[in-house]
Image: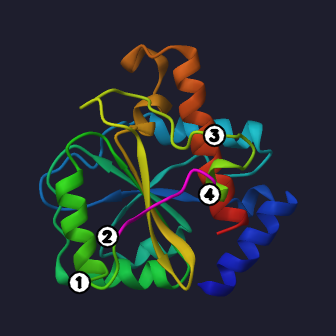
């Protein structure tokens, strides 16, 4: 898995990945009753945007993978969202830990109401690690697009500032948690939330930065 990811990152940065070997990303399915399937149009729109603006080659077919499945190791980037409860079983937690420590990347995007549950469950995965807030000069804000003020605010929710948190292993970011921003809503088809073009562009640009960071710098 580590070897595959190293080569994938190299080829991504050079723009040399052939269509049949395109990078693949997935949506994470989890237990607990939360709506892991929220924002059904978001990832396809983000992939389309990244393929156009970053000149990369991400497969347009978005897979769904369960936390405890071996299939997760086929996807170097996995996205998680939802509004409600999350429960990782012991085997789920061990599998996700192995996935992240072997080179995978998890992006958790709070769609509102996820915070309490995901913080609790990620402690099952990494009991000795805490979410650390990313500084505004973090490289993830300085990829193709520049975000001098850090994570953009896409939806108001509780009118708290948007924040990005990370979990690190050997000084490398392996899990990104975007909170009080709701990037996924901004990635959705325009008619879903009727966000302005400016808001949608900010969300897509930040998403593109995340993708570019994961496959080049992580």
Quick check: 116 left or right of 126?
Answer: left
Residue 30 in percent (x, y) is at 24, 61
Q: Secondary structure at mark 4?
A: loop
Q: Earlier in the sequence, mark 1 or mark 2?
A: 2
Structural distance between the alpha carbons of marks 4 and 1: 33 Å
Q: Which residue is mark 3?
A: 147
Please state which of the two labelled residues, at mark 2 or mark 4, is closer to the viewer: 4
Q: Which residue is mark 1?
A: 91
47 vs 159: above or below? below
The residue at 29%/79% (across/down) is 125
Q: Earlier in the sequence, mark 2 or mark 4?
A: 2
Q: Hey, which quadrant is residue 116 in on the image? A: bottom left
* Marking on residue 138: 4
The residue at 73%/64% (across/down) is 216
Q: Secondary structure at mark 2?
A: loop
Q: Earlier in the sequence, mark 3 or mark 2?
A: 2
Residue 92 or residue 205, whichever sits in front: 205
Residue 33 or residue 119, whichever sits in front: 119
Give the class, few, some or many, for how many residues have Cα within 10 Å of label 2's Cα (few <14, many ≥20): many
Please state which of the two labelled residues, at mark 4 or mark 1, is closer to the viewer: 4
Structural distance between the alpha carbons of marks 2 and 4: 28 Å
Please state which of the two labelled residues, at mark 3 or mark 2, is closer to the viewer: 3
**Quadrant location, the N terminus:** bottom right
Residue 19 in percent (x, y) is at 76, 55
Magenta range is 131-138
Q: Which residue is mark 2?
A: 67
């Amino acid at each position: 898995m580590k070897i595959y990811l190293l080569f994938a990152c190299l080829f991504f940065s050079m723009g040399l990945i052939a269509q049949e070997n395109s990078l693949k990303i997935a949506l994470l399915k989890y237990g607990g009753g939360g709506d892991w399937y929220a924002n059904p149009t978001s990832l396809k729109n983000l992939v389309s945007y990244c393929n156009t603006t970053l000149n990369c080659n991400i497969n347009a077919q978005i897979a769904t993978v369960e936390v405890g499945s071996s299939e997760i190791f086929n996807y170097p980037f996995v996205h998680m969202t939802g509004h409600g409860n999350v429960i990782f079983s012991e085997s789920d937690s061990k599998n996700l830990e192995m996935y992240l420590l072997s080179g995978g990347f998890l992006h958790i995007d709070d769609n509102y109401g996820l915070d309490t549950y995901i913080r609790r469950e990620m402690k099952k995965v990494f009991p000795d690690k805490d979410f650390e807030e990313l500084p505004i000069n973090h490289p993830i804000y300085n990829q193709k697009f520049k975000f001098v003020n850090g994570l953009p605010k896409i939806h108001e929710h509780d009118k708290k500032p948007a924040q990005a948190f990370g979990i690190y292993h050997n000084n490398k970011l392996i899990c990104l948690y975007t909170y009080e921003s709701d990037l996924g809503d901004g990635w959705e088809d325009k008619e879903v939330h009727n966000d302005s073009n400016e808001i949608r562009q900010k969300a897509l640009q930040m998403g593109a930065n995340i993708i570019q960071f994961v496959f080049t710098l992580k």
